[in-house]
Image (spheres, rainbow, N blue to C red):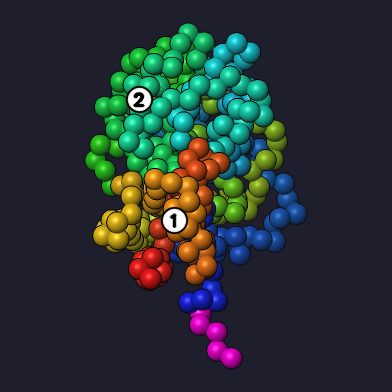
Amino acid sequence: MNIDRKIAEKIKLSQNENPLGPSPMAYKAISEQCNTINRYPEVHSVTLKSELASHLELSTENIFVSAGLVEALDIMIRNFIVKGENLIIPKLTFVAYRLLAKVFNVETRFSKMKDYRIDVDSIIENYNNQTKLIIIANPNNPTGNIITEKELIKLMESVSQQTYVAIDEAYCEYVSDEDYPNTLKLQKEYPNLIVMRTFSKIYGLAGLRVGYVIASKEIIKQFDYYQPPFTVNKMATIAASAALKDKQFVKDSFEMNLAGRAFLEKELLILGYNVVSSQSNFIFVFFNEQEDQDKIFNKLASNNVIARKMGPFGDFKAFRITISKLENCQKIIDCLRH
């Protein structure tokens, strides 16, 4: 019996992975060096750190390489905040922030959202002398929108230099909005600004777990101090070093995502869905009732399109769906039309 491939194949759009796969240059580098996995990786990933510094025109003293951004977040939340101090995060944002804060029993203040945007004014309202760390995903996960450079400057001007402001830029390479902050430039004026980026998204290396932090040398020393040896594996750094040089792959990934994002947003709006305009590689779809969200989520699932419910992130009436290749975006729309 013939099985329709459209029905048989799952389209996984739940974790914002690059649908083009890994960087070909990264794949080639791993293939050529897989016989070295009997050797331990470098402590503090010194080669990748050097290449990132060159790429960003910074000193190696300003770079920290971590096992995905979750390790860097773990170090900050576990070690940078002491008893009596607090953390501020938006009410609807990357779930790892609140989970780590709960694990380490950190007092957490949740700033309000305004029309599904991070509200900088609400962060400032929640801020006090005991606030040690503020974390902002920009673009925000799961809503996909950004805070602007003007908004970030307003925040930096409103907090003490003793408060760390960490900007999680995991999806920064997908941004096309000209108002997106130039955080590396802003760091020259605000030494308490911490920038976090990853190879998991546009570079297609999510399974290898490699991220990096850009900060003042004093802050980087703290990250280095708290990082156990060998947490970033050898193949991850080899792949990341190669991917960093694969400019064509990054360009292709950006352009594919830009086209898919425009198509999916337009078609979903035509069909009457509520969507947040995205600057990332996913679309946030929200509903008036949880029942409506469940119905559409299940309709997609029954057609083997796997989205991500947003309950753990803080919204039980929404789901997030990764932007894929245009043919898969078309399948999503075809499914919802019937």
Where residue 76 sits in the image (x, y, percent)?
58, 26
Taking 237 as reference, is 118 left or right? left
Q: Which residue is mark 1?
A: 322
Say which residue appears at 51% left-offset and 80% top-offset. Answer: 5
Say which residue appears at 65% left-offset and 49% top-offset. Answer: 234
**Range of residues picked out in magenta:** 1-5
In this view, which residue lies farthest toward the right?
A: 38
Disc 2: CA contacts within 10 A as few (<14), some (14-19) or many (>=20): many
Taking 147 as reference, is 141 left or right? right
Q: Is residue 59 above or below residue 160?
A: below
Disc 1: CA contacts within 10 A as few (<14), some (14-19) or many (>=20): many
Where residue 333 sits in the image (x, y, percent)?
36, 66
Sequence-first disc among 2 and 1: 2
Q: Answer yes or no: is residue 280 visible.
A: yes
Q: Quadrant of residue 247?
A: bottom left
Residue nearest the viewer, comparing 204 with 50: 204
In this view, which residue lies farthest toward the bottom?
A: 1
Where residue 228 sits in the image (x, y, percent)?
70, 33
Local SS, label 1:
strand
Say which residue appears at 46% left-offset and 35% top-offset. Answer: 92
Asked if the stretch drawn in magenta spans residue 4, the answer is yes
Q: Quadrant of residue 151?
A: top left
Quadrant of the image containing the N terminus: bottom right
Q: Which mark is residue 120?
A: 2
Type of the residue with mark 2: Val
Residue nearest the viewer, comparing 53 with 82: 82
Local SS, label 2:
helix
Q: Which mark is residue 32?
A: none
